Amino acid sequence: MHVLYFHQHFSTPQGSAGTRSYEMAQALIRAGHSVTMVCGSYAQGNTGLASSFTKGRRRGMVAGIDVIEFDLNYGNDMGFAQRIGVFAKFALGSIGVALREPADVVFATTTPLTAGIPGIFARWFRRKPFVFEVRDLWPELPKAMGVITNPLVLWLMAVLEWSSYRSANRLVGLSPGIVDGIAARGVSRDRITMVPNGCDLDLFADPAEAWRPEGVRDDQMLAIFTGTHGNANGLDAVLNAAAVLKARNRDDIRIALVGQGREKAALQDRARAEGLDNVLFLDPVPKTRLTGLMAGADLGLQVLRNVPAFYYGTSPNKFFDYISAGLPVLNNYPGWLAGLIDETDCGFAVSPDDPEAFADALIAAAEDRQALTKKGANARQLAEAQFSRPLLAGKWVDWVVGAGGAK
């Protein structure tokens, strides 16, 4: 079968973005299917194409995937209006692809929510089976965060959400809360399955050479955050904990924040103003090099703003990368990931908005390295038992291909 796959932020492992779509496309190819991937140009991604754009697009084969890339640059530092503009242009360009390109199944994955538009057109104008993957609940999350308050915009997003769900033959949710959220919109649960983000066990089993940021000693405990520095991430919580560590004279702990985003400059300014030299800021690194950083680190930080919609409604790539690398995880909000950490003893789950508890967990990690090593082993065991990419990809392939009437 041929799957026409829409993901605006597609990236190969050579980029510093999530690689779920790349891995799922590879799983389809291994199962004997073919894939056309339709994407834009993401600042932290790498599509694998290097040729010049012609009339706003370029096309080529990347690791067996037929990639169509639109010349639409997107970055996490963009403002709201800029993002909407890029999302709309990608959706409009994708409609033409959806109406012309060969397909046995059309698959689209968020974010953004507008990713569902080409699937809607393919379903109703070409009668193609459509599978829609939901990575975040929109407009629920931006509304809960206060990012979008305009009632007209929220209503339009709700209409698009409803239309995408009702048009899809099948849906994929990445977390328990997402599945519940889709069902709450009136979608029968037999049309929904959960396939969370997965663990690239082979990649992290043979990591690049271990390394640490400049200025971090071998005897210091290194905690890392790898991801977007945005409003949703609430990284001021990390600086609040770092301030507690400074007040307690804990020079044996270092924190590295790796990535980009709209909040990064403000975070750096705050760290300088408060003398938080125990926090380092690093540029994004490709996943192939990130494995070496994780091999050199002691703890992974899973941090989000204290927004109840996040508790069960997210499936963060970084958490699964951490446990793939055998890194114990410090999580600062309740929900399904905190539950996994408590159940398997693979890290620390602390209450939100509590810098003292956050700092206490970092100190506990630094003072008992033997226990920390055991938590890391438990993390890797969790990755292998429940979230291995081949296991989840097999389920995903069966679900997607099954929408076309074959397994």
Image (spheres, rainbow, N blue to C red):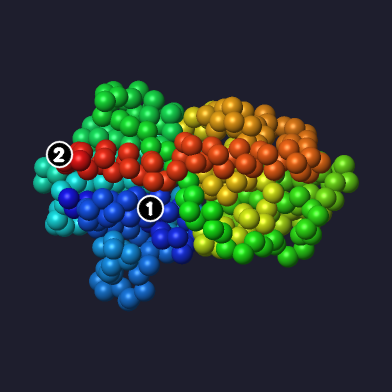
Q: Which residue is mark 1?
A: 23
Image position of 131 (left or right of 199): left
16 over 158 or under it: above or below = below
Q: Is residue 245 above or below residue 341?
A: below
Q: Is residue 398 left or right of residue 340?
A: left
Image quadrant where residue 60 sits? bottom left
Q: For residue 125, what is the image quadrant?
A: top left
Task: Tell me which residue sits at (71%, 57%) in the image.
Answer: 280
For badge 1, the amino acid type reads Glu
Is residue 263 in sight in this rendering?
A: no
The structure residue drawn at horizontal position 22% and vertical position 53%, both measured from the top left corner, is: 32
- Label 1 SS: helix
Residue appearing at x 75%, y 41% in the figure:
370
Residue 206 percent location from the top left of the image: 54, 58
User: Can residue 205 be seen in the rendering of this structure?
Assistant: yes
- Mark 1 Cα shell of 10 Å, populated few (<14), some (14-19), many (≥20): some
Secondary structure under tag 2 reads: loop
Q: Which mark is residue 405?
A: 2
| Cα separation between marks 1 and 2 | 23 Å
